[in-house]
Image: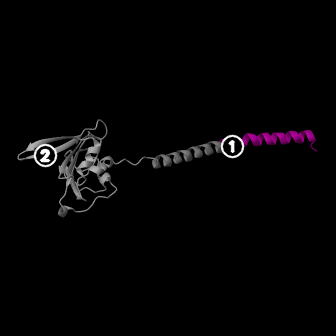
Amino acid sequence: MINVDQRLRWQNEQVRQLRHKSIHLPRLLTVTALMSFGLFVAALVLVFVSRSVDTPVNPFAVYADILPGQLWSNMEAHGFECDSYNAGNTYIETCSLRPTSGIFSRVSVEPDGDTIGALMFSIRQNTLTLGDVALAFGIRLVGQPSRNSWMGGDYSASVWMDMGQFSYFQPVHHLYLYRSEPDQVVGSLPSDSV
């Protein structure tokens, strides 16, 4: 017969051996659980960061009230400086604004009677791409080597950029919006685009 002391020693030895054998399993489970939790947190962070990316602001929205066809008096609120020059038998008035910062280095307007006939944006180097213009106006451009044009609403537009293969990533140098004749209008730009 086994006495009580031997039996307790034997049980303690068995428990010690089980603990020694099972000590690796909890460490492995802990490491696996921590790695899984870390990957889950990283995935959540990526999802939230990707959803919190700001939608680009339409740089033309500030000038929505001076698009071609708008009242000439609207441009006064923007602080344009006006000048006239002699073009043969007529005097032509043009007004310019030279922002000190931002995407545009110069914004010029030309009258057409009591309304704005044309609007020219001179764009600082590498601050605006053809894709930005297409997104701002909600249009799909048809590529040409150095100039892209479209018509819509009451005005037409031309974009000047470097010559080369058509790409929405090409930087834009100038954007010229001008009054269209009613029979030239092909489509319309979205009313909330600018």
In the image, farthest residue toward the top: 100
Q: Within 10 Å of the Cα at label 1, are there few (<14), some (14-19), or many (20+) other Cα atoms?
A: few
Q: Which mark is residue 26?
A: 1
Who's the residue at 80% across and 42% down the image?
A: 15
Q: Is residue 17 magenta?
A: yes
Pick whichever of labels 2 and 1 is earlier in the sequence.
1
Tell me the element at label 1.
helix
Q: Within 10 Å of the Cα at label 2, are there few (<14), some (14-19), or many (20+) other Cα atoms?
A: few
Whole-percent x and y of residue 7?
89, 42
Residue 170 in sight from this viewpoint:
no
Q: Choose between 105 and 166: the one closer to the eye.
A: 105
Residue holding disc 2: 92
Q: Choose between 129 and 186: the one closer to the eye.
A: 186
Whole-percent x and y of residue 175?
23, 47
Who's the residue at 50% across and 48% down the image?
A: 48
Whole-percent x and y of residue 70?
25, 53
Image quarter hosting the N terminus: top right
Who's the residue at 17% across and 60% down the image?
A: 181
Magenta stretch mostly in which secondary structure? helix
In the image, the segment drawn in magenta is 1-27
Q: Choose between 164 and 127: the one closer to the eye.
A: 127
Q: Amino acid at mark 1?
A: Pro
Q: Amino acid at mark 2?
A: Ile
Q: Is residue 84 magenta?
A: no
Tell me the element at label 2.
strand
Instruction: Locate residue 94 relative to residue 129 in the image: left or right.
Output: left
Instruction: Locate residue 179 relative to residue 23 in the image: left or right.
Output: left
Contact? badges 2 and 1 (CB < 8 Å): no
Instruction: Locate residue 53 relative to residue 95 in the image: left or right.
Output: right
Image quadrant where residue 24 sits: top right
